[in-house]
Image (spheres, rainbow, N blue to C red):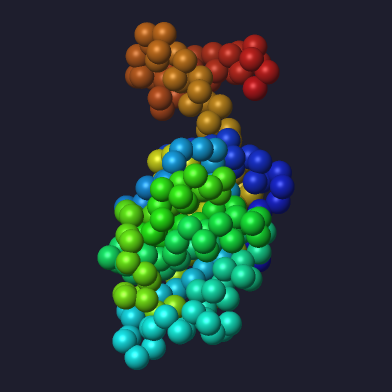
Amino acid sequence: MTGLTDETRETLMGVSTATLTTVMFKRGFRNVFLQGLGRLGPGPNMVGFAYTLRYIPAREDLDVLASFADRDNPQRKGVEECPPGAVFVIDSRGDATAASAGCILAARLEARGCAGIVTDGGFRDSPEIAELGMPAYHQRPSAPTNLTKHHAVAVNDPVACGGVSVFPGDTLVGDNEGVVCIPAQITAEVAKEAAEMTVFEDYVMERVKAGASSYGLYPPTGAATMDEFKAWRQARGR
């Protein structure tokens, strides 16, 4: 299941991960920002539903180059079956001492119409991945093949990534700051609230840049703040 409609996806393309974490905090969710991940090259938001791959530590008798020829290899199977619009999320146990994937597999995901690729490990060929049109997030570059440290065991199961529980179908939103995971069943509600909050934050930023104090403005505790915001919003058609 996924909570992503075209309308919700478009809404989430215009909100920041910072705003989303605040909206989620209001709902009692404290652990939604994938820790330690950075984006390879800036760009528009990444929005998609989670399709996952889980690694455990490699074992020398199993993780050999010949294993890539096995069509049931979960890493290769996951890449070939990841649906359009999905974000390929790799649980690498936070271990970036070997690559979670490289440019060829990332390019294959892009060709399949995937919305992005995320790992709490590292990517090899990271300069080339940065040049793809598909957003990518990782901990740091890592040239060694995944076989030296990672054994792929499961596709589209619940995983941990960046210290956050990610279930298949959850919504992943990434910007140039990082990645947030939103449970599928509340995605539409969170998107609407975040869009409203973004409009108000734009108003606050304009006022602050013009010299206004943050007291009474953010949060809007001043008696006239919301009336002034409504007038500002109407004047700008927002």
Give the image quarter of residue 228: top right
Identify the image quadrant of residue 35.
bottom left
Residue lying at 37% horizontally and 76% vertically, measured from the top left: 147
Q: Residue at x 38, y 83 (%)?
A: 63
Viewport quadrant of the N terminus:
bottom right
Nearest to the observer: residue 12 or residue 94: 94
Residue 90, position in %: x, y?
45, 66
- When asked about the image quadrant of residue 2, the answer is bottom right
Direction from residue 4 to residue 133 in the image, left or right: left
Left/right placement of residue 200 relative to residue 147 reads right
x and y percentages locating residue 165 in the rendered image: 43, 65
Q: 128 above or below 82?
A: above
Q: Residue furthest top?
A: 210
Instruction: Please give left or right for residue 170 compared with residue 21 in the image.
Output: right
Which residue occupies the extreme right position in the image? 6
> Residue 200, can we see it?
yes
Q: Please state the total of marks drawn on the protein image.
A: 0
Quadrant placement of the C terminus? top right
Instruction: Return the residue nearer the eye: 214 or 32.
Output: 32
25 versus 237 height, above or below: below
Q: Residue at x 70, y 51 (%)?
A: 5
Q: Residue furthest left?
A: 97
Residue 199 at what x, y percent from top left? 56, 27
Does any portion of residue 163 appear in the rendered image? Answer: no
Residue 46 lies, in percent from the top left, at 55, 46
Viewer-proximal residue among 30 and 62: 62
Identify which residue is drawn at 46% across, 46% down: 130
Is residue 156 depicted above or below 60 in this figure? above
> Is residue 89 or residue 207 the one in the foreground?
89
